[in-house]
């Protein structure tokens, strides 16, 4: 079973990625939450280019995927759930929640540490937020995230199925909660009890620092409530809020090359 999952991983992940991307892209067109302030074509070119670049970088630098690491850990008896048996279902559910918590903590760390903020800020320089923003991360951040995730998988001893499920969930929910799709307020209020919604995460992309430093969750909303980083609404409302960073307001200067060079060329965070 594990080998079947490993052999099918690329098709499963690509299938979910393309399906969710297409669904959210159509939803955004049919029922947009906000009017865009910049060229959608230019943004999509940059964001999708970064997405493909990241896929190539990961493929070159990591010959073993996160799922492969889980299988190696299982074979060699590494990690909590490979030492203390809890059953694949229970272990898998706990592993998914633990990995999500680690992503939340990593996200907060990338905001608080100057060195890592220089990398992560690439994600926040997008002047609008839509489905493609969910994959707009500097290659350095993707590399660091993969290393942290692999180490966490080994320590947890996460079952292979849970790692694949988490990868699909993280990727899918990132596209969902970065989307510009309109969801009714009542529906949003129900959904955000269980999953990070677009309105909840959009606050995190506000130009205001105290709002940028809130709503760090990507998948589960509970960590923001637990650690006191939850913010229900932006101060200026979703229609009035400004997205991006104060020092990066000119879309003509946010070219693909300048975005990739940002960790080296940017000044200190204000």
Image (tube, rainbow, N blue to C red):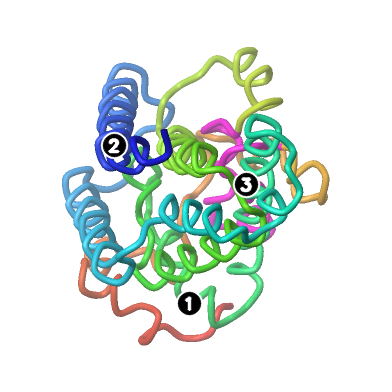
Is 132 or 102 nearer to us in this picture? Answer: 102
Residue 60: % across, % down: 24, 69
- On whether residue 194 falls in the magenta region, the answer is no
The residue to which callout 2 is attached is 8
Report the Cα–Cα distance between label 1 and label 3: 23 Å
Disc 1 element: helix
Image quarter (top left, top right, bottom left or bottom right) of the N terminus: top left
Report the Cα–Cα distance between label 2 and label 3: 23 Å
Left or right: 218, with 252 as reference point: right
Left or right: 196, with 264 as reference point: right
Left or right: 144, with 228 as reference point: left
Residue 100: numbered disc: 3
Q: Which residue sits at x=40%, y=80%?
A: 263
Residue 144: % across, % down: 47, 70
Q: Mark 2 or mark 1: which comes first in sequence? A: 2
The residue to which callout 1 is attached is 118
Left or right: 231, with 148 as reference point: right
Residue 199: % across, % down: 56, 32
Residue 50: % across, % down: 25, 59
Magenta part of the chain: 196-221
């Amino acid at each position: 079973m594990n080998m079947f999952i490993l052999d099918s991983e690329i098709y499963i992940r690509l299938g979910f990625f393309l399906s969710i991307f297409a669904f959210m892209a159509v939803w955004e067109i049919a029922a947009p939450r906000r009017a865009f302030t910049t060229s959608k074509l230019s943004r999509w070119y940059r964001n999708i280019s970064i997405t493909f670049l990241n896929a190539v970088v990961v493929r070159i630098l990591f010959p073993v995927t996160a799922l492969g690491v889980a299988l190696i850990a299982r074979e060699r008896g590494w990690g909590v759930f490979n030492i203390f048996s809890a059953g694949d279902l229970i272990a898998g559910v706990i592993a998914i929640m633990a990995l999500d918590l680690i992503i939340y903590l990593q996200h907060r760390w990338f905001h608080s540490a100057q060195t890592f903020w220089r990398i992560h800020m690439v994600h926040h320089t997008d002047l609008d937020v839509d489905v493609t923003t969910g994959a707009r991360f500097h290659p350095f951040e993707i590399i660091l995230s993969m290393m942290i995730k692999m180490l966490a998988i080994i320590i947890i001893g996460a079952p292979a199925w849970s790692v694949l499920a988490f990868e699909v969930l993280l990727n899918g929910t990132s596209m969902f909660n970065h989307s510009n799709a309109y969801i009714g307020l009542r529906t949003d209020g129900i959904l955000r009890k269980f999953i990070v919604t677009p309105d909840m995460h959009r606050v995190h992309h506000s130009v205001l620092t105290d709002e940028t430093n809130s709503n760090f969750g990507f998948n589960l909303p509970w960590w923001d409530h637990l650690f006191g980083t939850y913010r229900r609404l932006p101060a200026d409302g979703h229609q009035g809020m400004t997205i991006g960073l104060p020092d990066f307001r000119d879309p003509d200067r946010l070219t693909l090359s300048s975005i990739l060079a940002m960790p080296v060329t940017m000044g200190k965070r204000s």
